[in-house]
Image (cartoon, rainbow, N blue to C red):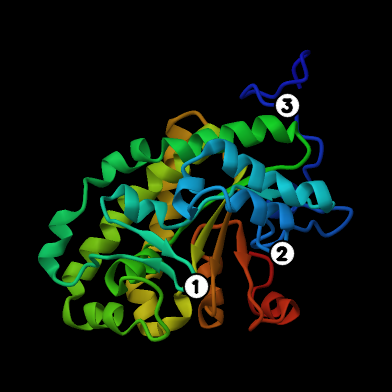
């Protein structure tokens, strides 16, 4: 700690590092707690803030994202904050139109239907520059947290992002996305590589902006069986972790723990534990004790 009470990046020194120590596999005095969607509609102040503008306008406002991120910490003794944003800002940065329809969810008016539609996407190298508002929100939030708890950054994993871009929104079957995997495997891999190339600098940029941990959401893992998951999801999950860690080293940035959360991906726990992440997130389909027996201490 420097004499002025600031850490090496100029942010206030962290006072509660329990979550980070647990994420690195160290012993802690208690089990740290943070919640998915801890900034959410159950909070009246969240609803009030969100009512001021549409969803993605909120995501593009660093001030609004900071406020929404901090709201649950004013009520509850949480051990981490997670920046308010959305995984679909990445497809937006690639040039796709995305809207949030009340009562329905995300909608892509012009989804990817044919292989040539990939030509509509921007160069993934420009994505990080398009998402500067996320980095600004992270920096502002780190400053206003004043070292109370660490801040988590996040992104959606390539397969999950692909499903939205191909389906045109949410889907109970992911039929269109699966059709791509079977009928257009080369184009599917091309799209997944584009997304991976976009995600790596985006996640590194979040750390440079102040994120102290990263979570990758493979929210649609459960729509794939083991064979398709191992072919179209897992390689890119691994690649994201490997390349992010390498880029952090190259940039002279301190490493941060990375979390992989594959919803309904219980069939791939062993593979995920070897994918280069410090933490494997579990959902309700996996009992923590059983997961520990399956994985041991990796």
Which residue position is annotated with label 2?
42
Image spot of residue 24 (x, y percent)? 68, 51
Classify 10 Å Cα crowding around label 2: few (below 14), some (14-19), many (20 and above): few
Image spot of residue 268 (x, y percent)? 51, 78
Left or right of 258? Residue 147 is right
Of tags 3 and 1, which is closer to the observer?
A: 1
**Residue 185 found in image quarter:** bottom left
Left or right of 165? Residue 264 is right
Which comes sooner in the sequence, label 3 or label 1?
A: 3
Which comes sooner in the sequence, label 2 or label 1?
A: 2
Q: Nearer the viewer, residue 281 or 82?
A: 82
Query: What separation in Å lies between label 2 and label 1 (alpha carbons)?
Result: 16 Å
Label 1 secondary element: loop
Q: Looking at the image, is 255 positioned above or below residue 180?
A: above
Which residue position is annotated with label 1?
103
Residue at 65 percent of width and 47 percent of height: 69
Q: Nearer the viewer, residue 176 or 211?
A: 176
């Amino acid at each position: 700690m420097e004499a002025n009470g600031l850490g090496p990046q100029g942010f206030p020194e962290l006072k509660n590092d329990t979550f980070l120590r647990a994420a690195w596999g160290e012993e802690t005095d208690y089990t740290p707690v943070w919640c998915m969607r801890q900034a959410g509609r159950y909070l009246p102040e969240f609803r009030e803030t969100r009512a001021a503008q549409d969803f993605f306008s909120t995501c593009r406002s660093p001030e609004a994202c900071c406020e929404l991120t901090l709201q649950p910490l004013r009520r509850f003794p949480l051990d981490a904050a997670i920046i308010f944003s959305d995984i679909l800002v990445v497809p937006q940065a690639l040039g796709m139109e995305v809207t949030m329809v009340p009562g329905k969810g995300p909608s892509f008016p012009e989804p990817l239907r044919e292989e040539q539609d990939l030509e509509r996407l921007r160069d993934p190298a420009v994505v990080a520059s398009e998402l500067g508002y996320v980095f600004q929100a992270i920096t502002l939030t780190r400053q206003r947290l004043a070292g109370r708890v660490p801040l988590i950054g996040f992104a959606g994993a390539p397969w999950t992002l692909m499903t939205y871009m191909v389906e045109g929104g949410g889907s109970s079957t992911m039929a269109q996305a699966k059709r791509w995997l079977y009928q257009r495997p080369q184009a599917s891999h091309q799209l997944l590589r584009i997304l991976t190339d976009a995600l790596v600098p985006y996640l590194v940029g979040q750390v440079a902006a102040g994120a102290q941990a990263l979570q990758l959401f493979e929210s649609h893992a459960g729509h794939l069986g083991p064979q398709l998951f191992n072919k179209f999801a897992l390689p890119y999950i691994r690649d994201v972790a490997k390349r992010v860690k390498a880029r952090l080293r190259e940039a002279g940035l301190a490493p941060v723990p990375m979390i992989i959360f594959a919803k309904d991906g219980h069939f791939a726990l062993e593979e995920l534990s070897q994918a280069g992440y410090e933490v494997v997130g579990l959902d309700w389909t996996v009992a923590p004790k059983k997961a520990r027996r399956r994985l041991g201490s990796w």
